[in-house]
Image: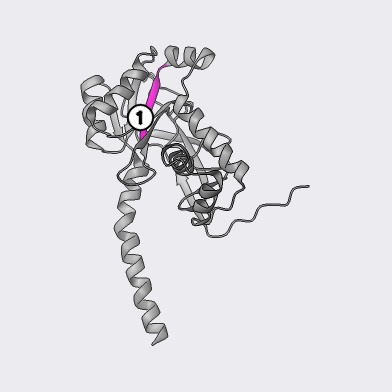
Amino acid sequence: MKPRKVYSSVVKLAVHPSPTCPSCGSLLERIYTTRRKHVISLKGFLRVVYHVAVCKNESCPLREVPIKGPLVNLKHRQYGFDVIARVGWLRFQKEQTLEQIREYLRGYGIVVSKSVVRELSNLYMILISTRPEGEELALMRKRGVVLAIDGVQPEKGNETLYILRDCISGNTILARNLEVGDTEGIKSLIEEVLSLGIKVMGVVSDKQRSIVRAVKDLLPGVPHQYSQFHYLKNVAKPVSSEDQTLKKELKKRLRG
């Protein structure tokens, strides 16, 4: 019997879809919450739950279709997108060995074997070469998708891994590295999705200017909603900063 894993310094993360329907703008209604999942990220161990909601507007094309928020990890995988992107970048861009990457991850408190590093490298290659096909593609063409666009940058000043997925099924449509995440680069990703014959009924992303412009040019009239996840994360930054300052002041007083 395998020993039960023990996680220290676990950060609880509840991922919600945006409060309104990306197709018609009506308020979404939560229908269920997924089981807790432990995700290993560069920011620590996350205990993640995903809230799933539906639109109750009877005239909406997404009526009763489950909609999820942004994913932080691949389905059935324990490691976050940030870990996979970083490992792929170190392995194929920096040409580091498995042992070097293993030591690098140890600096983030992630202790893994070389076989796990190899598996993460393979996941990265699968991710950047993925394209929906067969029944999955046929369903997307028939039903349409709510397109989520998110970028993961392994290191500042380097390529960004952009992941485009369907908010309805949670499946990744494609993932590509871009040296420059400008409007033309984002357009090329959206055009690749459209070339598959997939109808985009709505878009969810952060407020990156190049994404906003690309969606406006290529998908005129398609609702574009800014991610609640990114919005709340940005709101939390100054609060976190103030909390750190307060912590330092309290320590000074206690030590004094």
- Please tell me which residue lies in front, 252 or 86: 86
- For the image shown, how many numbered marks are present on the structure? 1
Residue 37 location (% of width, % of height): 57, 44
Magenta stretch: give its range.
Answer: 144-150
- Please tell me which residue lies in front, 127 or 145: 127
Q: Main secondary structure of the magenta part?
A: strand
Residue in the picture at 58% in, 37% down: 119
How is this picture coloured?
one colour
Residue 59 visible in this rendered orientation of the protein? no
Q: Residue 71 colored magenta?
A: no
Residue 214 visible in this rendered orientation of the protein? yes
- Please tell me which residue lies in front, 218 or 115: 115
Residue in the picture at 35% in, 29% down: 21
Residue 77 location (% of width, % of height): 57, 38
* 64 relative to 222 in the view: left or right: right
Residue 151 location (% of width, % of height): 36, 37
Q: Quadrant of residue 6?
A: bottom right
Work out which quarter of the rendered image holds the C terminus and state it: bottom left
Q: Which residue is mark 1?
A: 21
The single residue placed furthest to the right in the displayed view is: 1
Question: SS for tag 1?
Answer: loop
Q: Residue 149 colored magenta?
A: yes
The answer to whether residue 13 is above or below residue 207 is: below
Residue 189 location (% of width, % of height): 33, 24
The answer to whether residue 116 is above or below residue 165 is: below
Label 1 amino acid? Cys
Residue in the picture at 47% in, 28% down: 66
The single residue placed furthest to the bottom in the displayed view is: 256
Residue in the picture at 40% in, 17% down: 144
What is the crowding at mark 1: few (fewer than 14 residues within 10 Å), some, or many (at least 20)?
Answer: many
- Please tell me which residue lies in front, 155 or 61: 155
